[in-house]
Amino acid sequence: QVQLVESGGGLVQPGGSLRLSCAASGASFSIYTMGWYRQAPGKQRDLVAAITTGGLTNYVDSVKGRFTISRDNAKNAVYLQMTSLKPEDTAVYYCNAHYQFLIGQYDYWGQGTQVTVSS
């Protein structure tokens, strides 16, 4: 079992930056692929960025070059550095821990943190 707590959201002007943090508690953080998802009002929750146990990263096209995901296994934490923020980045951002095994998978979610990009 993994418990996830996000922080770092807030209100920022277009072009600004924010750094989201996700603190994980529980066993074996390093075995999970970690991801950041976001959900805007009336829309589905979509993957923004992910980082594997080996440090490989993946981003949705709309954030490439602007967002950076990283993890610190010693601190049981994952981060999302967001720069050049746009109004369309406004959403609730969720941290996810994912573990795939032969016959199934585990997925754990945080409670979310609101990011609002507005002037």
Image: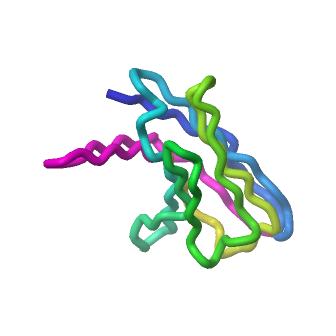
> Along the line of sight, which residue is nearer the eye, 54 or 64?
54
Q: Quadrant of the C terminus?
A: bottom right
Q: Is residue 115 magenta?
A: yes
Question: Residue at position x 71%, y 50% from top?
Answer: 10
Q: Is residue 33 above or below residue 83?
A: above
Going by the picture, which residue comes out furthest to the front?
54
Position of 104 relative to 47 (above/below): above
- Tell me what residue is drawn at x 62 percent, y 24 percent: 75
Q: Main secondary structure of the magenta part?
A: strand
The structure's colour scheme is rainbow
User: What's drawn in magenta, residue-wise?
Assistant: 96-118
Instruction: Indicate the quadrant containing the N terminus: top left, top right, bottom left or bottom right.
Output: top left
Location of residue 85 in the rendering, given as x and y in whole percent from the top left corner: 77, 67
Residue 69 in picture, x, y percent from top left: 65, 52
User: Where's residue 8, x and y in %?
Assistant: 69, 42
Q: In the rendered image, which quarter is residue 110 located in?
A: top left
Front position in the image: 1 or 111 = 1
Q: For residue 43, which quarter of the picture? A: bottom left
Q: Is residue 94 visible?
A: no
Residue lying at 85% horizontally and 69% vertically, measured from the top left:
15
Relative side of 15 to 81, left or right? right
The residue located at (67%, 45%) in the rendering is 20
Q: Nearer the viewer, residue 14 or 70?
A: 70
Res. 52 in view = yes
Asked if the magenta segment contains residue 4, the reply would be no
| Image position of 108 (left or right of 85) | left
For the image, the number of numbered tags is 0
Residue 90 appears at what percent x and percent y?
63, 66
